[in-house]
Image (spheres, helix red, strand yellow):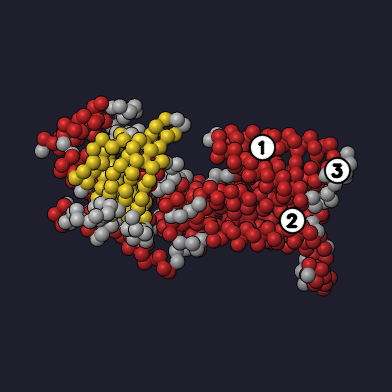
Amino acid sequence: MNPHAAVSLPNDCPRNFIEFQNVGLKLGGTPILENVTFGVAPQTIHCLIGPNGGGKTSLLRSLLGQMPHSGTIRINGACKIGYVPQFLEMDRTLPVSVLDFIAVSCQRRPAFMGLSKRWRDKAFEALERVGLKNKATRKIGSLSGGERQRVLFAQALLPMPDLLILDEPMASMDETGIRVFEKIVCDLCLSGVTIFWVHHDISQVRRVAHNVTCLNRSVLFDGAVGDVLTGERLMGVYSQEPVQNFVTSQHSAQLAMGAADV
Amino acid sequence: MFETMRASFQAMAHAGDVPTIFQYGFVINALFCAVVLGPVLGGVGTMVVTKRMAFFSQAIGNAALTGVALGVLLGESYTSPYATLFGFCLLFGIVLNYTRGKTGMSADTLIGVFLSISLAAGACLLLFVSAKVNTHVLESVLFGSILTVNDVDIVVLLCVTFLCLVVGLPLYNQMLLGSLNVSLAGVRGVRVKLLEYLFIIMITVLTVASVKIVGAVLVEALLLIPAAAARNISRSLKGFFGWSVLFATVSCIAGIIIPMQWDIPVPSGGAIILVAAAFFVVTTVLRSSLTVFNEARVS
């Protein structure tokens, strides 16, 4: 499960897979991001943590080219990007089945004409991977929140990405779902996929990530998990609360403390 | 071409091969429009319902009122003032969407405001010009009239349908994904904003092309009701789309034939929508009584 054992970290690799350089973002005159500079090494799991309102999602959306940021964000080399959003907001009564959703995401042929041959086997493979093969024809609206997240995950694997971007996809998942999710992410990393993961659960970051960046408007710390994720540091980050609305700070700090004690 | 089609149907009607109403050229025109219009409105309707844009298409329908009045004022033929209709409705739809994007106002507030403005302007202008033209023109613009469908209308309808198919089918998935999750669509290379405008243009031209048959007031109902009825009894996009197309087409045809056959003096638009509404009522009853359609509610 733990990828540290199996993957030799590509420290010798001269180029980062993703590079953020002096990234800044202002929305309505309010600075959201300032001087954000760090890199994501290829074939690693890189987690982005930080208090709520600290700009994690904004940085992600800048990376996806959906925010008018300053500075540069470079993805080195051509690559296929898979993206798992935080949640799928959708009318529960809408007659869109799991397979329909996969078809809508991947293919050009109108989804009401069914999945094309090209994607059919791959779609079932991806659904099997996330444990939803037997619910392929169910309406998305009838799935639980966690199952819906797994559908979103399956869609991100079609086609198999070089870079997988996860935006706190596990907020509505139960513990079993989380473990399944972790396993797939680690397996993907082993097979050469770079994972950039916005995360809120420090204990899980310790468990799976190679590198971690803590963001609160600017980068607070950045480095290998073992080096930078110390209990005192996290306490420092999460107790100052320089940004308002930090709801989960106490919870995360407790988790951090617990993990540090172990 | 249309002349040949009409002549052959009329010959068949005289020979007794098809019902006698086919001996009237205008019935053949209207039914031809219905067969073309129904499937397109039904198909696009699934998108309107998914994207929650029913209210928007209502606003476009009301803009068509103003468009017709403007056309008559500017001296266009009052039976088919297409230049002004297309021009005004497209402008209306695009400005509305642009304002929504720029101000970030909630869609229902903004559409409500635009809808009221277009209705007010349309009412004033229409009553102003009604002094100049036959009041039947007013009635047919509002509620549709199959008597006035001519070759120009058929050509306009065919062109619009063709455009909608060419643009809508290859972009169906992308438009849908854009409405389900903007970020995800962006990652998949979907140009969400552009497609939003394209979709609005599609609804607008379809609305304008349907004004003659269904009428400005009711055309958006045909974008909404068949799709809403189909949603009641579908569990996948295939069913949703298929039923919606079927309901819309049957509504169009039945709405034209039934009043003709039984000499009921009602406008075609009203009759078409009432048939569609019947589908909606039946499917709603089915949905609430059969558990097979209720999986979303149970969990």
Could you tell me which residue is drawn at 22 percent across and 46 percent down? A211
Residue type at tag 1: Leu
Could you tell me which residue is drawn at 80 percent across and 37 percent down? B125
Kindly identify which chain the residue marked by label 3 belongs to.
B
Could you tell me which residue is drawn at 82 percent across and 63 percent down? B25
Kindly identify which chain the residue marked by label 1 belongs to.
B
Label 3: few (<14), some or many (≥20) within 10 Å? some
Residue A21 in percent (x, y) is at 33, 44
CB under 8 Å between callouts 2 and 3?
A: no
Q: Nearer the viewer, residue A47 or B17?
A: A47
Camera-near label (2 vs 1) is 1
Q: Which mark is residue B256?
A: 2
Quarter-of-image position of residue B39? bottom right
Label 2 secondary element: helix
Residue B91 in percent (x, y) is at 68, 44
Q: Which residue is mark 3?
A: B135
**Would residue A9 be found to the left or right of residue B285 on screen?**
left
Quarter-of-image position of residue B150? bottom right
Label 1 secondary element: helix
Where does the N terminus of chain B fall, quadrant-wise? bottom right
Residue B106 showing in the rendered view: no
Residue type at tag 2: Ile
Label 3 secondary element: helix
Identify the mark nearer the N-term, 3 or 1. 1
Q: Which residue is mark 1?
A: B115
Give me the C-alpha separation between circle 2 and circle 3. Answer: 22 Å
